[in-house]
Amino acid sequence: MLGTESKAMASNARTGVSWGLIGVFTASIFLSATLLFSVQPMFAKLVLPLLGGSSSVWNTAMVFFQGMLLGGYIYAHIISKYLRLQMQVIVHAFVIAAGLFFLPLAIASGWTPPTEGAHAFWLLGLFAVSVGVPFFAISANAPLLQRWFSRTDDKDADDPYFLYAASNAGSLLSLCLYPVLFEPLLRLNEQTELWSQGYLLLLLVIILAGFAAVRRQKPGQPQVTASETSGQKVATSQRLFWIFLAFIPSSLMLGVTSHMANNIASAPFLWIIPLSLYLLTFVVAFSKKRLVTTQQLARLFPWVIAVAIFAGFVFKMVVIPSIVISLICYFLIALMCHMRLVDERPSAEYLTEFYIWMSLGGVLGGIFNALIAPVIFSDVYEYLIVLALSQLAVPAADGQKSDLGKIVLKALPFAVSGFIVFKLMTLMNIDVRAAALLGGGVFVYGLNKARGNMKLVLVDSAALVVLALFIPTYFKAPVLQDRSFFGILQVKAQDSEFGKVHLFRHGDTVHNYQFQDQALRKVPLAYYAKGNTFESALSAARARTPDMAIAMVGLGAGAMACYEQPGDSWTYYEIDPAVVSMATNPDYFSYISECAPNANIVTGDARMTILALPEKSQDMIMIDAFSSDAIPTHLVTREALAIYRSRLKDNGLIFFHTSNRVMDVSSVVARLAEDAGLDVRYTARSDFSGEPYKAYYSPSIAMVMGQAEDIDAVFGQDKNWMGFIPGKSVKTWSDDYSSVIGALRSHANKEFRVVPAR
């Protein structure tokens, strides 16, 4: 009886200790993940002003973080395989301690962005020297701690993958809290200080977890695991499938991010949404109790791709619904891939290797989108390609696993045949869309026959019809199509009653037109047409100051050059070298070459390059730096306004082009004016009746900011320039705070009010 009671007490004690063991490991992984993913938006926001707020900043940052994550996983695999557990704990504690020398986090000194090319590689280098060491140290924690736990005597030690769900839960919580708690309540220097304190706490918790692992090490377990041979060995084909399953969600995440950033705003809050969904799929997939099974998801899956294509390509101009539907489809595709990853996971002895291959797939997805696609594709074809490839993640049949290598080999002849059919039909001058339908149909049939799932033929056929019939821009060659770090630009030729017209599209927004008839080539159009907001503000200011010094932020097609007059001094600022090349080439647009052949064009981000101007030298600064309706938030902050004002004469004015399909940018500008003690006037132009070229005018909204007496002196009682009361949801933006949510809400609810000028 006494022996029985003693055994029961020992068992209860062991249960208590086990809960303590699980608790310390869960806390370690959770804290590690929280730090890992909070540093991403925080440091990306620090570097935004250096590279214009482009979504490519975030995509490139993701490549860096994914690459460092892979490096951390490889390091974890090596030390867990070749070092005794005690030595692993000691070595890893020293690696984490090395990161303390890089705290608090800050942009490394001496790094200046290049004016032309290599922006992505420059940014990777900046991240490496600024946050590389501490991020590397933290990135190894998830697989290493799981491996340590697997070597304890806990009852769950044989399957420690559930801890990965805790890791992703911490990551998800960190990302969700950043825009709603840390970003609005803490300045960036306070955020970096708090992160440093968390990093120090992590070092202590990791040491505690390592001590617990050594103390609870499973009896009789070998100290070094290099000779482990138990369990089924992993085949090369399985490793490749892991890479593929990790590649698809990573690539799609960056594709959806670019779609959002190019059509709303380039801001950390929006970048976080796809990444949060990405992490949520890991939480669901690695949980012990899933909300949905792989087969249940597979039955829904065939239609997800078709819906994603419609949302991302056909209805993309309906911005918010398109983005919401794209996010839902992306979530389902990522969930399918990650659930299949979990289904294909190996035994615990191959745990660290499994995470290496999974991480490699994520890195390759990021590299493909951020570094390779912008070089080899002139449009966002990578998003469409990966959507099509994602159907390979669906199980071939109930209970069966896909052999990706065999599928590719079986489908390859059909792919070659389809391409040959397409080329032959185009050589015979058959409509290119019909050629795409037939050639693509051959490939689609072969692909799905190889997969053994013919249900997807309907889905793929629908996608082909969409591409061929509803997206003519993919088949009609433009005059120019170029892609840079900052986006996609396109020049297309159209016929009109005035002859041929060139159209400039950046992202999804048409920014300008130009008549090609020699007699009309100097006529500004679109936003810049006579009587529209730009010309109206400029004419009013010129009435007071005939000879003007003007800083024009955003070159576009260069139409504003035709408003230069003798005695003026204009400086144009453009961050994208591809736009400069287009605007100065008369084969595309001749505004610059005909109206201002000696124009002073400065390449680089305006917040940095405008500082080269003498202080108090400009009569007017005009801000027109939108890219596909996405506002670089760092150009509309308190700190940015201080830079503009330092280069503005005491009686100078600042013009903001605030047209936007989804955000109330005018309220953002008005709040900045309130904060700085300045006055604003608002105007919106959409009625161009009576203008001979009205078909090529673009409705626009603008704000002019300045001292109250200067605003009154220039605009007087002009009823076209009104007073403005900003929306209540919009607060003053700064480099430390920019609430995209408030601007979205104000636009949707029309919170702002236009009132007569006082």
Image (cartoon, rainbow, N blue to C red):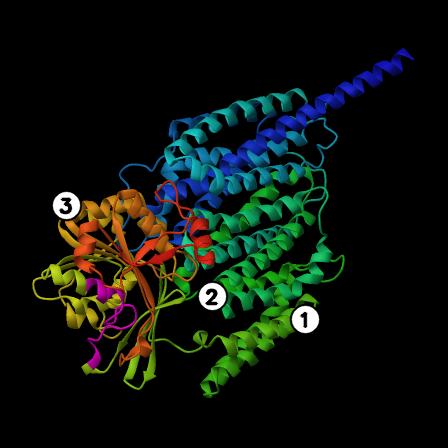
Residue 370 can be seen, yes or no = yes
Using the image, determine if residue 437 lies above or below residue 310.
Answer: below
Residue 485 can be seen, yes or no = no
Mark-to-mark CA distance, 1 and 3: 69 Å
Q: Nearer the viewer, residue 281 or 431?
A: 281
Asked whether, in this view, residue 710 is left or right of residue 438, the answer is: left
Type of the residue with mark 3: Glu
Disc with the residue nearer the chain's start (1 vs 2): 2
Q: Main secondary structure of the magenta part?
A: loop
Q: Which residue is mark 3?
A: 615
Using the image, determine if residue 263 lies above or below residue 585.
Answer: above
Disc with the residue nearer the chain's start (1 vs 3): 1
Q: Is residue 528 magenta?
A: yes
Type of the residue with mark 2: Tyr
Structural crowding at the residue carrying mark 1, measured as other residues with C-alpha within 10 Å and reported as few (<14), some (14–19) or many (≥20): some
Q: Is residue 161 magenta?
A: no
Q: Which residue is mark 2?
A: 381
The magenta region covers 520-538
> Which residue does the image show at 58% across and 33% down from the upper left?
29
**Local SS, label 2:** helix
Marking on residue 449: 1
Type of the residue with mark 1: Lys
Asked whether, in this view, residue 564 is left or right of residue 75, the answer is: left
Quarter where residue 524 is shown: bottom left
Looking at this view, name the residue that lies furthest to the left. 567
**Local SS, label 1:** helix
Asked whether, in this view, residue 62 is left or right of residue 497, the answer is: right
Structural crowding at the residue carrying mark 2, measured as other residues with C-alpha within 10 Å and reported as few (<14), some (14–19) or many (≥20): some
Disc with the residue nearer the chain's start (2 vs 3): 2
Quarter where residue 500 is shown: bottom left
Q: Nearer the viewer, mark 1 or mark 3?
A: 3
